[in-house]
Image (tube, helix red, strand yellow):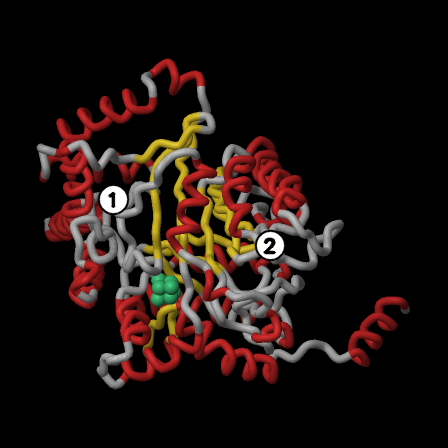
Amino acid sequence: MSTHKNKASVALSTLIKKIRYLEEITRPINPKAMEAINRRWKELPNHVKTDSQTLGKVGVGCEGTHGVFPKCNFACSPCYHSEDANKVKIDGKHTIEQVKSQMEYLYRKRSSYAHAQLIGGEVTLLDPHDHARALEVMRSFGREPMSFTHGDFDYDYLKKLVTQEDGKRRFKRISFAGHFDSTMVGRRGQRRVSKEEEIDPYRQQFCEMFNKLKKEMHVKFYLAHNMTVTPQNVDQISGVIARCKSMGFNMFSFQPAAYVGDERRWKEDYGSLDPDYIWHQIEIGIGTNLPYHDFEVGDVRCNRSAWGVLVGDQWHPFIDITDKRDREVRDFYLNNMGGFHFNIPLKLLIPRLIRFTIKYPKSIPLAVKYAIRFVNRLGGIVVIVKNRITPFTVVMHRFMHAEDVLPAYELLKRNELSSDLRIRETQERLLACSYAMAHPESDEIVPACVQHSLLDPVENKILAQSLPLPTKRKVNQLTNFKNV
Ligand code: SF4
């Protein structure tokens, strides 16, 4: 009798555990993620607490790695890497350990989910299996990783990256940001270029590698195109977009050059770059106005972004802000869907959506009416069926000059605001930063501007000691050994 009772109580407690587990994983919004998002909102300075602010409403912002593989085999001008970056050996073990420590810290301090960039020097200098392992580690801490590359690698590398040692597929989807512009030096077959259009074949080739991977291995992809903007190529922006927007990229991101990183690579007057002029060039390339106040990411002096889709080669924003009904949808999304992630398996997405709509029944008519309006704005069902539809975001991210960041950050650490207008602006932007890097050793999360201006030089000096490049003698010894 008592054995029966014991069995029944074990079965009951197992059932309760299962129900609890199911209840937790089908929650539309993770409470811890929401806590982190709310915390971010409280920390934000008042000037960015606008109706269209996404930071502190739907997310905590982007993240990036640092000091995990500083070396790069290109020599671009400018380059935000410090002068010692190329003295640090590529070492997979170091990369994975550091990625793990930084991501674990971000998971603990910020939230269970964020977009994070696997960035340093050149990511494809890593052995493909180390690269893959680093991506897995990032995902294990709820990060959606994007690998940053100059794009000068072969299909074989990509294939190895997504293949396990037993030959099975390792990833169902991957994200890459490819840096392509005429400030770069070192591409195979094209060491230097003077005009942006000379790089188009390489941009195309990059997209084609991922298309091939999708066909052969069924690995989906998200591709960003990154371009450093300088006085020399600013007037070529519109041409780059017009020629390349339909190649297969999902994002075009522009970084006006700043005086940060290796001083030997500063060649032009970067202070003369006008954000309005650059944005206008981008608009010319896209072929329409790009509203950047519909969704703001931190301070618009740092980030401008326009979110939408390409139908064929025609860009349309997700939201028509002049339409009151679209504004209502935007506000509903920003105010109620913080911490809701669409990028999850269907078996989780569907129950979470069902629970969300039970909590907010109003969301159903709102979404249905919005979808009808959006389809009509794109030209109707026939146009959609006949054309390729690509989610397409345009971004301009303006890093700041190191000489402004250093005093601004020093004062912020003492809780002081500067009376100098330029430094004050820098402080305001740092406080609203949307691109963070983790320092578990000092229990700090810092803006990438601070990382590149202040911390990278010291970090890379230390790494150059602990991970020195092999000396010529050692290389010779290794070569001789291989020849035996
Ligand atoms: S503070 Fe620097 S890293 Fe942060 S969003 Fe602004 S420009 Fe980017």
User: Which dot marks residue 150?
Assistant: 2
Q: Position of residue 385 (x, y in %)?
A: 40, 17
Element carrying mark 1:
loop
User: Which dot marks residue 347?
Assistant: none
Residue 11 seen? no
Left or right: where 308 falls relative to 388: left
421 and 406: which is toward the camera: 421
Residue 62 seen? yes
Above or below — where is 167 with respect to 112? above
Distance from disc 1 to disc 2, alpha carbons, whole Å, reads 31 Å
* Residue lying furthest right: 484
Query: What's the amino acid at mark 2?
Result: His
Asked whether the beta carbons under mark 1 and mark 2 sit within 8 Å of each other, the answer is no
Element carrying mark 2:
loop
Above or below — where is 367 with respect to 446? above
Q: Position of residue 446 (x, y in %)?
A: 35, 72
Residue positioned 68% across, 47% down in the render: 154
Residue positioned 53% across, 58% down in the render: 230
Give the labeled residue for mark 1.
294
Q: Say which of marks 1 and 2 sits in front.
A: 1
Residue positioned 28% across, 40% down in the render: 348
Residue positioned 64% across, 61% down in the render: 125
The quadrant of the rendered image in which ligand 1 is seen is: bottom left
Query: What's the amino acid at mark 1?
Result: Asp
Crowdedness near tag 2: few (<14), some (14–19) or many (≥20) residues, C-alpha within 10 Å: many
228 and 438: which is toward the camera: 228
Image quadrant in which you'd find residue 480: bottom right
